[in-house]
Each structure stands twice: as structure tokens, then as C-alpha cells.
Amino acid sequence: MLRDAMHRTRRTFKETLNAALRAGLVGKTRQARKIPFLVKARPMGLRTGIDPTSLNKLADDLEVDAFLEKARRRKKA
């Protein structure tokens, strides 16, 4: 496609590629402006006592516990 456009417009490959990229980027930004993206909020269904802002800490704690349990099993074997 680029080679055909290159021959039709009598431009270099670099000029043709840059023009195609610019045209593609401009087209996408126009579409993005027309249709705004909306996020639909949904309840997470968390139990009381679970802080949604510290879920990474909970995941880290669970990973450490699993690692320690695996290490204990290896020592016993």
C-alpha cells in the first residue's frame, strides 16, 4: 500500500509513511472526540472490613503466605 502511494504521489517512502501516520492519527482523534467513553460504575460486592484501596497489600500478603508454606513443605521433604 505504501509503495503504491509512493509511486502515485512521487514522494519518498519516509514522506509517504509520515503522511499516512498523520492521516491515521488525525482520523482517530476526530472519532474519539465524537464518542466519549463512559465508565459504568458497578458495586464490587466486597465484604465489610475489606478496604478496596489496599487490595494490592492483601494480594502481597497472600503471595508471601503461599511462598512461606511452599518453603515449609520443601524443608519437611
Image (spheres, rainbow, N blue to C red):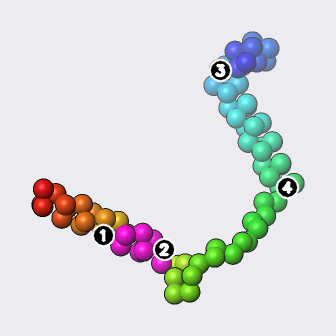
Answer whether labels 2 and 3 touch (C-beta < 8 Å).
Answer: no
Answer whether labels 1 and 4 touch (C-beta < 8 Å).
Answer: no
- Left or right, 66 with respect to 39, comes to left
**Quadrant (top left/top right/bottom left/bottom right) for the N terminus:** top right
Near-viewer residue (14 or 31): 31
Instruction: Report the amino acid beneath label 3.
Output: Phe
Of mark 2 and mark 3, the one earlier in the sequence is 3
- Which residues lie in the magenta part? 54-62
Q: Which of marks 3 and 4 is in front?
A: 4
Of mark 2 and mark 1, the one earlier in the sequence is 2
Any part of residue 74 in sight = yes
Percent position of residue 54, x then y: 48, 78
Kindly state the secondary structure of the residue where label 4 is placed: loop
Q: Name the residue under label 3.
A: 13
Near-viewer residue (48 or 20): 48
Quadrant assignment, res 59: bottom left
Quadrant assignment, res 22: top right
- Left or right, 69 with respect to 7, comes to left
Instruction: Report the amino acid beneath label 2.
Output: Leu
Question: Which residue of the protein is positioned furthest toward the front in this rendering?
Answer: 77
Q: Name the residue under label 1.
A: 65
Structural crowding at the residue carrying mark 3, measured as other residues with C-alpha within 10 Å and reported as few (<14), some (14–19) or many (≥20): some
Kindly state the secondary structure of the residue where label 2 is placed: helix
Of mark 2 and mark 4, the one earlier in the sequence is 4
Instruction: Report the amino acid beneath label 1.
Output: Asp
The dot on residue 55 is 2
Q: What is the magenta segment's predominant secondary structure?
A: helix
The alpha-carbon separation of the residues under discs 1 and 4 comes to 46 Å
The alpha-carbon separation of the residues under discs 2 and 4 comes to 32 Å
